[in-house]
């Protein structure tokens, strides 16, 4: 069940302007939170409050400064935060597409950066750039399809992300670093709770409205912010150690570990990392991953 916008569109449905994807309420997706309940200027106030996502990603970008691939990944995550705020504030189709298409590109970028070559088709294992080009073409195709039928985007993104959780679980089971393994388990658990909350908000809205608590999607945002941060840190560790077993990576937390689940994990090399100077590696950086 979805709550429709309180903006009066009577008499406007025949206006060609209504076909604009930037029009307020032009998206067919409307979450359980009642619209304009807090302020007349913001459709879903508490869902829009995930503006925190933008500055958290900015902090992580500084802490996890890297070159090439992961830099693009963080910039896309910041775009997701901006798009999500715009979408929930206006419920416009344009905001929905920016939000969901950015997520699509982040997921595919994650596969191109972190997926070990052992999982590639045989013909692509020796030439990783061919795998990257294939992913780019596939992502462009899916992007076009998402514009044609945007209602199915959220479910498609969930399905697309499932293999990544399986790969993460498999490689965590082989990891001998207890802190990284614990962080990965925490990440997967948080992701599982977040997905459960997302489904409950989407499928059982009438129940949440009956108990005056239609805010599950806002909690989804908080959980997915921190779980995505943890996933990138864990994947970066696993990939660097896979390519450079001698690398001495230390897990840190910002501002400190006493913040627990709300701290931002990041990695540092204990030494100068001079053996990572190869220009052919997307993870090459002098001191910080």
Image (spheres, rainbow, N blue to C red):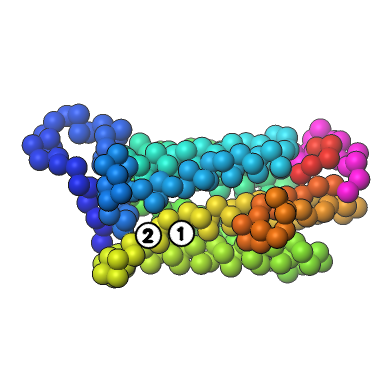
Position of 185 relative to 59 (above/below): below
Q: Which mark is residue 257?
A: none
- Disc 2 crowd, CA 10 A, few/some/many (<14, 14-19, 20+): many
The answer to whether residue 37 is seen in the rendering is yes
Residue 263 x, y percent position in the rendering: 66, 55
Locate residue 227, reporting x and y percent.
Answer: 59, 57
Q: Is residue 169 magenta?
A: no
Q: Residues within 10 Å of mark 1 (few under 14, many from 20)?
A: some
- Above or below 263: residue 131: above
Residue 89: image x %, image y %? 35, 42
Residue furthest left as drawn: 11
Do the residues under discs 2 and 1 have CB atoms within 8 angstroms?
Answer: yes
Asked which secondary structure carries label 2, the reply is loop
Question: In the rendered image, which residue does mark 2 sit on?
Answer: 215
The quadrant holding residue 97 is top left
Q: What quarter of the picture does the N terminus occupy?
A: bottom left
Q: Taking the image as drawn, is residue 97 in sight? A: no
Residue lying at 62% horizontally and 47% vertically, measured from the top left: 110
Q: Residue furthest top?
A: 17
Question: What is the chief secondary structure element of the magenta stretch?
Answer: loop
Task: Please state which of residues 55 and 75 is positioned toward the viewer in this rendering.
Answer: 55
Q: Can you say whether 190 is above or below 74 in the image?
A: below
> What segment is highlighted magenta in the picture?
270-284
Q: Decide whether residue 283 is among the magenta residues.
A: yes
Relative image position of residue 24 (x, y in whole percent): 27, 37
Q: Nearer the viewer, residue 177 or 154?
A: 177
Residue positioned 35% across, 36% down in the render: 94
Q: Residue at left 85%, top 47%?
A: 269
Quadrant for the C terminus in the image: top right
Image point 55% across, 62% down: which residue?
191
Which residue is labeled 1 in the image?
219
């Amino acid at each position: 069940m979805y709550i429709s916008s309180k903006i009066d569109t009577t008499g406007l449905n025949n206006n060609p302007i209504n076909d604009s994807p930037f029009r307020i309420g032009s998206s067919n997706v409307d979450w359980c939170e009642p619209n304009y309940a807090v302020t007349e200027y913001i459709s879903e106030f508490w869902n829009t409050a995930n503006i925190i996502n933008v500055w958290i990603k900015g902090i992580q970008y500084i802490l996890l400064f890297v070159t090439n691939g992961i830099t693009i990944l963080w910039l896309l995550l910041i775009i997701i935060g901006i798009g999500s705020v715009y979408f929930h504030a206006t419920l416009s189709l344009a905001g929905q597409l920016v939000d969901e298409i950015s997520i699509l590109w982040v997921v595919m970028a994650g596969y191109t950066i972190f997926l070990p070559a052992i999982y590639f088709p045989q013909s692509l294992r020796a030439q990783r750039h061919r795998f990257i080009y294939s992913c780019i073409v596939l992502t462009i195709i899916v992007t076009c399809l998402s514009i044609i039928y945007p209602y199915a985007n959220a479910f498609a993104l969930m399905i697309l992300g499932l293999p990544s959780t399986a790969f993460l679980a498999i490689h965590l089971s082989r990891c001998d670093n207890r802190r990284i393994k614990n962080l990965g388990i925490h990440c997967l658990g948080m992701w599982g709770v977040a997905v459960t909350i997302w489904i409950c908000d989407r499928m059982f809205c009438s129940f949440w409205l009956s108990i005056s608590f239609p805010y599950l999607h806002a909690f989804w945002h908080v959980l997915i912010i921190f779980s995505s941060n943890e996933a990138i840190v864990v994947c970066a560790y696993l990939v660097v150690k896979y390519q450079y077993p001698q690398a001495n990576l230390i897990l840190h937390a910002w501002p400190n570990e006493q913040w627990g689940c709300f701290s931002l994990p990041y990695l540092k090399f204990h030494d100068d990392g001079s053996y990572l100077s190869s220009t052919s590696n997307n993870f090459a950086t002098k001191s910080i991953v």
